[in-house]
Amino acid sequence: MSSTSKKSERNRGFSRITGLSALKSRLAGLILTEDNSCILLTGPSGSGKKKIANLIAQALLCHAPTAAGACENCASCHHFDQGNHLDFSILEAESGKKIIPTESVRSELSDLVRYPRLGKRRVILIDADELNEQGQNVLLKTLEEPLPHVRLILTSSDPSRLLPTVISRVINLKVDPRTEEEIRQIIREELIDRKSDESGPLTDEDIRFFAKFASGLPGLALELASGDWFRRLRSETAAIYLSLDQAGELDLFTDISAFFLERKERIDTIFSVLQSLIRDELCILWRTETEIINSDLLSQLKTALEDKKRNLARRAEQTAKEQGLVRWKEEDSEWSRTERELRNRLAKAGAIVEESREALARNVNFELTITRLLLHLKFLAAGDEIIESGKDD
């Protein structure tokens, strides 16, 4: 069954899109006109582009659409819900592949000359992130001479990869991040009938956590909330991060590095967990504990932060002794020297996690990237000098 299957009589068409009022207003105008321009939906992975694209496709194929989208009662809507609509197709890479073969693009688009069989339109949904330059050039020919009965819908998480000539011929609609309250609403609606598993049913605290952690991305929130794998991964990652000050360098190069290597396919999620923990420590420093994401780890985070302060103070004291200096007692103020240094170090640590993410996206050696990251995080936790190096090391 498609992602647009009916849930209630009051939840049809574009009303299934939580939030995004400006986008829904734009869609209402596009559906009720004869404009056959290609629609491009852009937004981060997990923003809900695919669901919205399906709702647009259903509305374009509907026999009685309104400004609110598809009617969901006509024969076309029933076929769409059942996943067997003769005038709708999806062009995407095969499982395990990253690129749609150019010949597949050419074949799919050339077939669009056939007239629709169930209504007045044919609709094709294309994952534009999976088009290489040759595939985009094939698509460009269709965009330059659009057929009156054809509607194209593209989705892209990285529109900068698209050719300028393609971008200039589409209607670009941005899918913005949702608010935390909207994410909470989406989780409740989508997972309301979730059965208890080994992790138990979702609690209000679970929903609050996933909404905060997802940073406005409903797809990510639903993925994390749908199974127990993320709970285990977060717990294991947090345990490593919170004990790095006690870890020896041999541990970094063996057991801890192995943890990352064995979970290579989840490395982006691990990076997000690390960033959330660093962010939470900064929130504690800023005295804004109500804003932390990992609220169930508040006690451990506070303990780890105090350990970092002590380690920094001890290092400063040792440096002063070695240099024969008298270390002045820190003045009572909103920010002590130790806290200011720790704040800067945490900000640097967050930046290094992001640099590591970017490095792996550029296919930099995985083990070297992770080793550098772990060394930085350990030096941060232990109060040691952080190695300064650039992104391309």
Image (cartoon, rainbow, N blue to C red):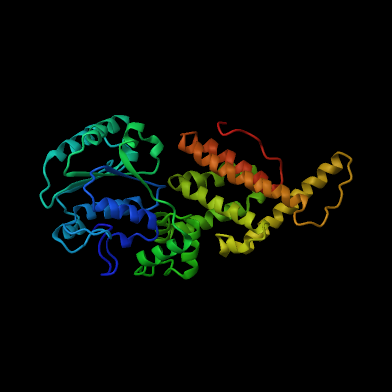
Q: For the point 34% across and 36% down, which residue is it?
A: 167
Q: Position of residue 358 (x, y in %)?
A: 50, 38
Q: For the point 38% across and 55% down, which residue is it?
A: 22
Q: For the point 41% across and 57% down, which residue is it?
A: 218
Between 264 and 67, the one nearer to me in the picture: 67
Residue 152 visible in the current orientation: yes
Left or right for 163, reference 331: left
Between 324 and 19, the one nearer to me in the picture: 19
Q: Position of residue 318 (x, y in %)?
A: 82, 45
Q: For the point 67% across and 57% down, which residue is it?
A: 286
For the image shown, how many numbered marks are present on the structure?
Answer: 0
Left or right for 321, reference 382: right
In the displayed structure, 201 sits above or below 93; it is below
Give the quarter of the figure containing the N terminus.
Answer: bottom left
Between 41 and 102, the one nearer to me in the picture: 41
Q: Position of residue 296 (x, y in %)?
A: 56, 64
Q: Position of residue 57 (x, y in %)?
A: 24, 51
- Image quadrant assignment for residue 77: bottom left
- Image quadrant assignment for residue 141: top left
In the displayed structure, 159 sits above or below 309; it is above
Left or right for 45, reference 308: left
Residue 377 visible in the current orientation: no
Left or right for 138, reference 161: left
Between 167 and 328, the one nearer to me in the picture: 167
Give the quarter of the figure containing the C terminus.
Answer: top right
